Image: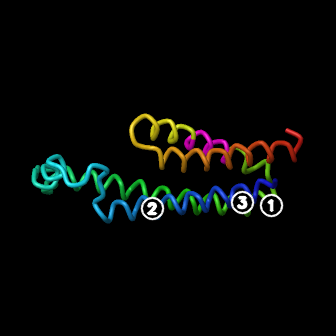
Amino acid sequence: MKPSLLLRIASIITLLFAVGHTAGGLSFWSPAGETEVLRAMRSFHFDAAGVSRTYLDFYLGFGFITSAYLLAQAVVLWQLASMAKTDQSQVRPLIGSFLLVSVASAFLSWRFIFLLPVVSFTAVAVCLGLAFYAAGKRNGA
């Protein structure tokens, strides 16, 4: 399979993951439902660099930042797919970087979160691993 196709697949999986991650944040979703912890996160205000924030503000903010980075990753993987059609050797190190981050993210999701992000990051990592291999193989590396 060509690296460009594998990168496009990884891009689409990442885009779907970004959309799902954002949708989950918009609904203030929690696997345990409404809990005392969520109520406390909403109600406890503190000063952060001169602005009143809650723990929920930080939780949601970091979640939306993650969504933004996932969206950026989807765009960059799509762009790399176009570049891979003309010069696979140039994109191979970039594929490797995204591969390492995807593997680390799959492990961290397994360790700290739950199954769905593990599956998503693993699917992206598999596509990237195959693209990395294919990009090297075609260039004789």
Q: Residues within 10 Å of mark 1 (few under 14, many from 20)?
A: some
Closer to the N terminus: mark 2 or mark 3?
A: 2
The reply to whether the magenta stretch includes residue 24 is: no
Name the secondary structure under disc 3.
Answer: helix
- The image shows residue 140 at horizontal and vertical percentages of 89, 41
Image depth: mark 2 or mark 1 in front: 2
The residue indicated by pointer 1 is 85
The residue indicated by pointer 2 is 20
**Start-end of magenta stretch:** 94-102
Out of 139 and 37, give the one closest to the viewer: 37
Q: Amino acid at mark 2?
A: Gly
Residue, far front: 32
Report if the CB atoms under discs 1 and 3 are less than 8 Å apart. Answer: yes
Report if the CB atoms under discs 2 and 1 are less than 8 Å apart. Answer: no
Name the image quarter holding residue 122.
top right
Report if the CB atoms under discs 2 and 3 are less than 8 Å apart. Answer: no
Q: Amino acid at mark 1?
A: Lys
Residue 81 is tagged as 3
Q: Residue at x 10, y 54 (%)?
A: 43
Task: For marks 2 and 1, give the CA distance.
Answer: 29 Å
* SS majority, magenta: helix
Name the image quarter holding residue 25.
bottom left
The reply to whether the magenta stretch includes residue 98 is: yes
